Image: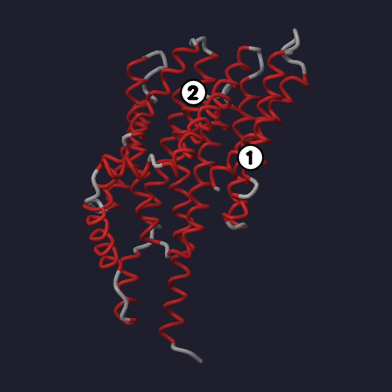
Amino acid sequence: MGDPFLRTSVTLRHSIYVVSVKCFFIFYILVGLPGGFQVRFLPIYFRKHGMSLAQVGLYRLLVLPWLLKGLWARYIDRHTDVRIWLKISLLLLVLLCVVAAQFPPTETIVVVTVLFLLNLITSVQDTAVDTLILDAFTPSQLLIGNVAQSVGERVGSIISGGVFSWYINFLDWSGVFYIMAALYGFGLLTSHILLPDWYASRSAGAEQLQMPSVQEQRSNFNAVASTNSQVTIVESAKQTFSNASMWMIVFVLFYKIGEVGVLSLFPLFLVDKGIDASQIGLWLGIIGQSVAVVGSTATAFYSFTFILGPLTVLMIIRAVCVVISWMTVVSWSIDPKTCFGHCTDFITLAVFEFTNALIKRS
């Protein structure tokens, strides 16, 4: 018959696990909102309203808080209640979007401030969610957690970058921010009502099964991390830039330069050629990101050794997509609305997004 307490404990943990996956999926959707909003919606919106390419490019500098995320990530992770940071960040995002909706996009200083704070607060939210997911899942469950993260961020990008761009002719500036405020408000309610209390449930089970509680596990982890942090910056830099990893650094550098160049500039080229912004949003923001979700999800069913093998094949496919897009640009017809021209580019960029998701997950 088995131990009744053990059966109850297993059932309880499974229910908590299912609810946790749903909660983290929602949180990562919210983490992905600013990315799609800034990378896909805003460039098309600004370019459609006559902003120069140089000015559009300067707005990308506002992602600086993500580069500095490590400065506050360690403090949030080790010295504070992560749940409080999650709720505070979501509340601030709601208030920020409501305030931003009160100003027109022509107020440059306000727009710059809003986007900077949007990145800063979202980076704090991302840190809190990443820390919570390590507390919620066991090592054997982290694969599903990683899939929830990857797919959730893509879905968030589809909403803010694809759906907003698709309805760009109907949504005004304030309407976009009100929608984002409503989404962040839903996330705040989720964090307050649905997010399970792993500390209480696991601590109770740990006492019966004579296992260390979550608090003890975190204390042990922080003690080990504190010991490991004694490595000097010079030694860490030597390990990072060793001969074994230098080729990977160079590879990722060129990979990201090419990726950003293709995915960021080409939609603006299509806008300049007269392609309707809603079509660009549909194909690149929704269809392109949807096939990227398929690519991210597919990696959950294969081992990383399987993914790493065809890396060369994936890079060749991406190179072919870029070449096709380049040939279409060079030989663009006098009529910019020719079906073959932009349909070819939309399809190749969709394939580009799919292989991009596979490579990132590998």
Residue 164, position as x, y percentages in the image:
54, 29
Front residue of this view, candidates 83 and 102:
83
* Mark 2 surroundings within 10 Å by alpha-carbon count, few (fewer than 14), some (14 through 19), many (20 or more): some
Q: How far apart, in angstroms, are the residues tagged by discs 1 and 2?
A: 23 Å
Can you tell which mark lies on residue 42? Answer: 2
Residue at point 44%, 33% (across, down): 34
Of the residues shown, which amino acid type is indicated by label 1?
Answer: Phe
Residue 103, position as x, y percentages in the image:
37, 19
SS state under label 2: helix
Front residue of this view, candidates 214 and 34:
214
* Mark 1 surroundings within 10 Å by alpha-carbon count, few (fewer than 14), some (14 through 19), many (20 or more): many
Q: Which residue is mark 1?
A: 354
Residue 122, position as x, y percentages in the image:
37, 38
Of the residues shown, which amino acid type is indicated by label 2?
Answer: Leu
Q: On the rendered structure, is 27 left or right of 288?
A: left
Residue at point 35%, 42% (across, down): 90
Colour scheme in the image?
secondary structure
Residue 121, position as x, y percentages in the image:
33, 37
